[in-house]
Image (tube, rainbow, N blue to C red):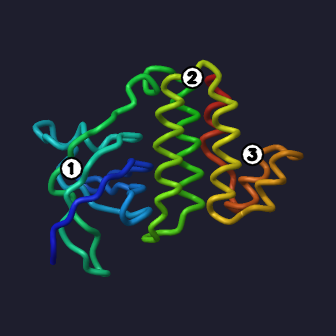
């Protein structure tokens, strides 16, 4: 077993047991990875604020076995995107972007281009007043980066939601929930 560090953005999280979480992270070094964060749901946990959704953090991971998830031993937040998290519309769009990245990117395949695009779009989303245009541009760039060029062309003539749902082969949860609040 070994210890190593990755810089990544938390795309998804789910609870495990009484105090643990399973995180899906898009990392610069390893692409989309799934890790276990033991004890982060306990009140005195020092790592809990660093493993929240949308956070750009540096994670120290232990383990590399194919049979077990790497374990988060340390985490340090670089950017928490608090301006996105304080605006309901922006957080909905940011979670939609994360759902797309999580669904379209394969596990354990390095893709620095997608990581840089995600980081950039989140930084711009926190500053912009017209977030929908930014998200539409991100959709096209993501599809082009991942090799879905013909689908990226379809976005110019069709509804982006339909194109993304066709690629993911399932309904997008984020957009259905957002329509109730915005």
- Image quadrant where one finds the N terminus: bottom left
Q: Which residue is depicted at the point 39% across and 57% down?
A: 28
Label 3 secondary element: helix
Of the 4 image quadrants, the one containing the C terminus is top right
Q: Percent from the top left, x then y, of residue 140? A: 71, 49
Residue furthest to the bottom in view is: 66
Q: Residue at x 46, y 71 (%)?
A: 109
User: Measured along the vertical axis of the image, is residue 70 above or below residue 52?
Assistant: below
Q: Which residue is mark 1?
A: 19
Q: Tell me if label 3 and label 1 are in contact, CB under 8 Å.
A: no
**Label 2 packing within 10 angstroms: few (<14), some (14-19), many (20+):** few
Q: Along the horizontal axis of the image, is 55 left or right of 95?
A: left
Residue at numbered disc 3: 161
Residue 50 lies in quadrant:
top left
**Mark 1 closeness class: few <14, some 14–19, many ≥20 residues within 10 Å:** some
Q: Nearer the viewer, mark 3 or mark 2?
A: 2
Of residues 163 and 27, the one drawn nearer to the viewer in this rendering:
27
Q: Mark 2 — residue? A: 128
Q: Nearer the viewer, mark 2 or mark 1?
A: 2
Choose mark 3 or mark 1, whichever is in front.
3
Q: Is residue 18 left or right of residue 7?
A: left
């Amino acid at each position: 077993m070994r210890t190593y560090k990755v810089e990544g953005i938390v795309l998804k999280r789910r609870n495990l047991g009484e105090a643990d979480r399973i995180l899906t992270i898009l990392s610069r070094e390893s692409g989309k990875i799934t890790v276990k964060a033991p004890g982060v749901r306990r009140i005195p946990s020092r790592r809990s604020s660093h493993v929240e959704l949308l956070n750009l953090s540096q994670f120290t991971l232990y383990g590399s076995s194919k049979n077990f998830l790497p374990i988060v031993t340390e985490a340090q937040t670089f950017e928490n995107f608090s301006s996105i998290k304080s605006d309901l519309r922006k957080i909905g769009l940011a979670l939609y972007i994360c759902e797309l990245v999580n669904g379209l990117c394969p596990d354990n395949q390095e893709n620095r281009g997608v990581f840089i695009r995600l980081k950039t779009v989140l930084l711009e989303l926190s500053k912009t007043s017209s977030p929908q245009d930014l998200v539409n541009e991100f959709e096209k760039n993501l599809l082009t980066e991942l090799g879905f060029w013909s689908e990226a062309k379809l976005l110019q003539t069709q509804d982006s939601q339909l194109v993304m749902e066709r690629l993911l082969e399932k309904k997008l949860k984020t957009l259905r929930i957002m329509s109730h609040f915005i």
